[in-house]
Image (cartoon, rainbow, N blue to C red):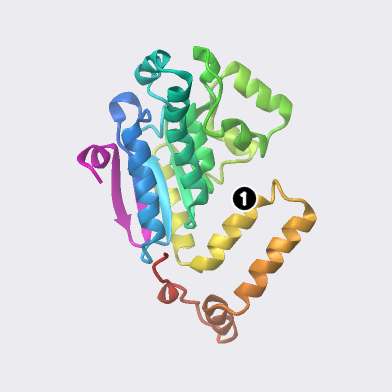
């Protein structure tokens, strides 16, 4: 990574868990091209690192991410339509990278998760949020429309009416309400979201790497597939898994009444 990318994203290890932290606290962790590049590269590196079992995405300074940098967005008015589209695809490529990462990615949200920050949190496989976290679709407040997959992710768990309300009002909703709506897996006391996310990630990091990647894909595709399509995909993954070393270890451990050790089977991805 370049020095700029190293500054934009702080990376550290907690055993088999990789913690990636948005590092722009002066702007409540507003997004930047350097952050897009740094996080995309970190996810690619994690994919190829057999020692990484799960990833936690969080933010420095008490906020997850306040969305796009308004100062940069103002400058985009001067660009042509294709140039603005190219800039936007930096965000969308990042959302795709989070969604497509084969390792479990857990968001740990304290403070603001607004605009594209909300999209980034919802792109993760699981979400741990402080009770007083503030989620907002936000765009309408400054005359913009949602991006980063916000409407797609929200539509997975709320009605059209609630989706429309959230997008047209841009109102802030708490971690508690987001938990009630569905996307928050664990609700934490203020200041404890990262600790809870690490505990969940540590549990997942001990699981079977290949099987979990296929499970992630099944869960992601279930919302768009017909029953027949989903049955076909489940069948393909199951017959493959039945002959894998992971299932050999898992079933042997069950029959021998011992904990399975899947970490010994992990190999770098190509």
- Horizontal side of 255 relative to 18 (left or right) equals right
Q: Quadrant of residue 182?
A: top right
Q: Quadrant of residue 242?
A: bottom right
Identify the residue at horizontal 66%, vertical 39% (top origin).
156
- The answer to whether residue 130 is visible is no
- Horizontal side of 195 relative to 162 (left or right) equals left
- The answer to whether residue 44 is visible is yes
Binning the other alpha carbons within 10 Å of mark 1 as few (below 14), some (14 to 19) or many (20 upward) gives some
Identify the residue at horizontal 42%, vertical 71% (top origin).
266
Q: Foreground residue, 55 or 69?
A: 69
Does residue 15 belong to the magenta stretch? Answer: yes
Identify the residue at horizontal 28%, vertical 44% (top origin).
10
Q: Secondary structure at mark 1?
A: helix
**Residue furthest to the left:** 3
Does residue 155 belong to the magenta stretch? Answer: no
| 174 is higher (above) or lower (below) than 200 | above
| 241 is higher (above) or lower (below) than 110 | below
Q: Residue 264: image x %, image y %?
A: 41, 76
Q: Residue 9: image x %, image y %?
A: 30, 41
Where the C terminus falls, by quadrant?
bottom left
Circle 1 residue: 220
Q: Foreground residue, 95 or 172?
A: 95
Q: Which residues are magenta?
A: 1-19
Q: Residue 127: image x %, image y %?
A: 51, 44
Identify the residue at horizontal 67%, vertical 23% (top origin).
164
């Amino acid at each position: 990574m370049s020095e700029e990318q190293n500054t934009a994203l702080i990376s550290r290890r907690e055993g088999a868990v990789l913690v990636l932290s948005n590092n722009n606290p002066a702007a409540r962790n507003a997004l930047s091209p350097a952050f897009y590049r740094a996080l995309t590269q970190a996810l690619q590196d994690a994919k190829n690192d057999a020692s990484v079992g799960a990833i936690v995405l969080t933010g420095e300074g008490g906020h997850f991410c306040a969305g796009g940098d308004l100062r940069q967005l103002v400058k985009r008015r001067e660009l042509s339509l294709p140039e603005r589209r190219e800039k936007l695809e930096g965000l969308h490529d990042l959302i795709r990278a989070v969604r497509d990462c084969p390792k479990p990615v857990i968001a740990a949200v304290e403070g603001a998760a607004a605009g594209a920050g909300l999209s980034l949190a919802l792109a993760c496989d699981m979400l741990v949020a402080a009770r007083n976290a503030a989620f907002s679709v936000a765009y309408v407040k400054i005359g913009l429309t949602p991006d980063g997959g916000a409407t797609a992710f929200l539509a997975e768990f709320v009605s059209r009416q609630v989706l429309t309300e959230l997008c047209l009002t841009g109102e802030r909703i708490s971690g508690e309400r987001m938990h009630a709506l569905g996307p928050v897996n664990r609700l934490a006391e203020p200041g404890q979201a990262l600790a809870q996310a690490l505990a969940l990630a540590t549990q997942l990091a001990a699981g079977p790497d290949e099987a979990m990647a296929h499970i992630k894909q099944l869960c992601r595709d279930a919302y768009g597939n017909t029953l027949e399509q989903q049955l076909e995909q489940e069948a393909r993954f199951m017959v493959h898994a039945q002959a894998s070393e992971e299932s050999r270890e898992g079933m042997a451990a069950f029959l021998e009444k011992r904990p399975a050790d899947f970490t010994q089977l992990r190999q770098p991805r190509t």
